[in-house]
Image (cartoon, rainbow, N blue to C red):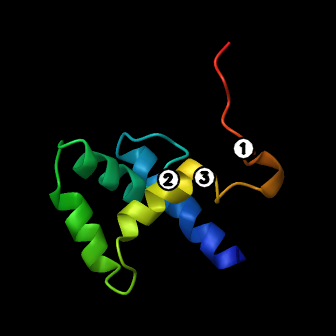
C-alpha cells in the first residue's frame, strides 16, 4: 500500500471518528454496515456514487476492514480468534 493511500485512509478514519464512528473504521465501511443493517441506505449509495469507478466501494471497504488489510502485515489476524 502506498504512502498516499495510507494517508487517505487515515483521513477517512479521522472523519468517521469526528462523526461519532469507531476510530479504526473508515466512513465507507460504516456506510456499508448501516445499509446492511437497515439503518440507512443513502450514505452507502452516495459514497458508492462518489467512487463510481470502483464497484461496491463501501462493501469492499468493509471487507478490507474485516480482513485488516489497512494494518501492517504483522498485526493482521492469521486465523479467527476463539473465545475461551
The residue indicated by pointer 1 is 77
What SS does tag 1 mark?
Answer: loop
Horizontal side, residue 1 vs residue 57: left or right: right
The spot of residue 78 in percent (x, y) is 75, 45
Q: N-terminal of the two: label 3 or label 1? A: 3
Q: N-terminal of the two: label 1 or label 2? A: 2
Identity of the residue drawn at 41% across and 51% down: 16
Q: Quadrant of residue 56?
A: bottom left
Q: Look at the image and tell me in which quarter the C terminus lies.
A: top right
Identity of the residue drawn at 41% across and 54% down: 29
Does residue 63 sit above or below 81 in this rendering? below
Q: As rendered, which of 19 and 55 lies closer to the eye?
A: 55
Q: Residues within 10 Å of mark 2 (few under 14, many from 20)?
A: some
Please identify, in this view, whether the residue under mark 1 or under mark 2 is nearer the observer. 1
What SS does tag 3 mark?
Answer: helix
What SS does tag 2 mark?
Answer: helix
Q: As rendered, which of 20 and 46 lies closer to the eye?
A: 46
Does residue 84 sit above or below 82 in this rendering? above
Are the residues flagged by discs 3 and 1 in contact, CB closer than 8 Å?
no
Q: Look at the image and tell me in which quarter the N terminus lies.
A: bottom right
Identity of the residue drawn at 16% across and 60% down: 42
Q: Quadrant of residue 8?
A: bottom right
Q: As rendered, which of 49 and 20 lies closer to the eye?
A: 49
Label disc, if present, on residue 67 of the rendered structure:
3
Residue at the extreme top of the image, as rendered: 84
Q: N-terminal of the two: label 2 or label 3? A: 2
Please identify, in this view, whether the residue under mark 2 or under mark 3 is nearer the observer. 3
Separation of marks 2 and 3 at Cα, in angstroms? 20 Å
The spot of residue 79 in percent (x, y) is 71, 41
Label disc, if present, on residue 14 of the rendered structure:
2
Residue at the extreme right of the image, as rendered: 74
The spot of residue 35 in percent (x, y) is 23, 51
Amino acid at each position: 500500500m502506498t504512502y498516499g493511500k495510507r494517508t487517505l485512509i487515515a483521513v477517512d478514519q479521522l472523519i468517521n471518528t469526528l462523526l461519532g464512528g469507531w476510530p479504526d473504521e473508515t466512513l465507507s465501511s460504516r456506510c456499508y454496515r448501516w445499509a446492511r443493517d437497515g439503518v440507512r441506505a443513502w450514505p452507502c449509495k452516495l459514497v458508492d456514487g462518489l467512487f463510481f469507478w470502483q464497484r461496491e466501494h463501501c462493501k469492499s471497504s468493509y471487507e478490507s476492514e474485516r480482513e485488516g488489510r489497512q494494518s501492517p502485515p504483522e498485526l493482521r489476524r492469521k486465523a479467527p480468534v476463539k473465545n475461551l
